[in-house]
Amino acid sequence: MLEETFYQGSSFLHRADPRAKVICVFFLAFAIAYLHKISAAMAGLLVGLLFLYGAKLPPSKIIKRLIVVNAFIGFLWLFLPFSAPGKVIFSIWKLNATVEGIEMATLITLKCNAILLMIISFAASTPVPVLGLALTSLRLPQKLILLLLISYRYLSVIFQEYNRLLQAARIRCFVAKNNMHTYRTYAYLLAMVLIRSYERGRRVYQAMLLRGFNGRFYCLQDFQLRKQDLLLALGTGLCVLILIGTDHIGAIPGVPWGA
């Protein structure tokens, strides 16, 4: 989700104060998660698309991330329509799909995609070190911010270590099959990755202490609220009020799902 190509841009979201973006995306995500009507969730998805368009991010990369997330959401559609009680619309063997189950799965799908678009538009347009500094300035727990920054820095290193060990196994004629030897080999690979990650973490921590690390990271960028940040906050607040109002008032005209 947080890719370096997303940081490069000149849109108003890229230029906005990271602290304002963190606060705005928090309230938008909370408001969307609160929604109970499909019509309101569709409005939230539309708002997410509008912010995504304003961020001017690469559409192909956004679509790839949406496909990955919706692949997991697809499992809901295998079970939720058949587990919620209500009016039966069709049956598969002895499993009855209900209108309420389908509506619930639709609501969850719309809300998840809307929140994901919000996070990509606001958070992914900010470099992770700058995002960590913004979270620090908002008085979030320092240990969680350090965990975020260090994890982001070394996840790719750990993945490279895993690929190196897997390549070494393939050189030794390892071929993945559905047998105990394959399961045992992958278990050994994961164990070695964990051990080497722990050893690397100790070395990195000792190196940081030798360089005077005192528990926090510093950033040369200075934050300053501007008029466009206030306009972004006002626009976000207006969107939150519209979404909550839509959820309470009723259905959007022309949309059949309001209750």
Image (spheres, grey):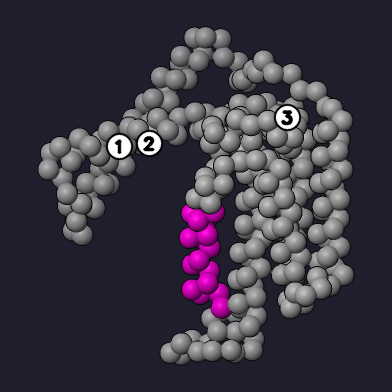
Please determine whether, in this image, residue 219 is positioned above or below residue 256: above
Residue behind mark 3: 15
Residue name at image x 55 percent, y 84 percent: 97
3D distance between C-alphas at marks 2 and 3: 32 Å
Residue 159 is marked as 2
Mark 3 or 1 closer to N-term?
Answer: 3
Of tags 2 and 3, which is closer to the observer? 3
Report x, y in % for residue 205: 47, 20
* Residue 255 visible to the viewer: yes
The answer to which image quadrant residue 221 occupies is: top right
Most prominent secondary structure in the magenta stretch?
helix
Disc 2 to disc 3: CB gap under 8 Å: no
Side (left or right) of 118 relative to 90: right
Disc 2 to disc 1: CB gap under 8 Å: yes
Report x, y in % for residue 176: 20, 52
Callout 1 amino acid:
Asn
From which residue to which does the magenta span run?
65-81
Most foreground residue, 127 or 47: 47
Q: Label 1 crowding class (10 Å Cα cut-off): few <14, some 14-19, many 20+?
A: some
3D distance between C-alphas at marks 3 and 1: 37 Å
Report x, y in % for residue 155: 45, 34
Residue behind mark 1: 163
Residue name at image x 23 percent, y 37 percent: 167
Secondary structure at numbered mark 3:
helix
Callout 2 amino acid:
Phe
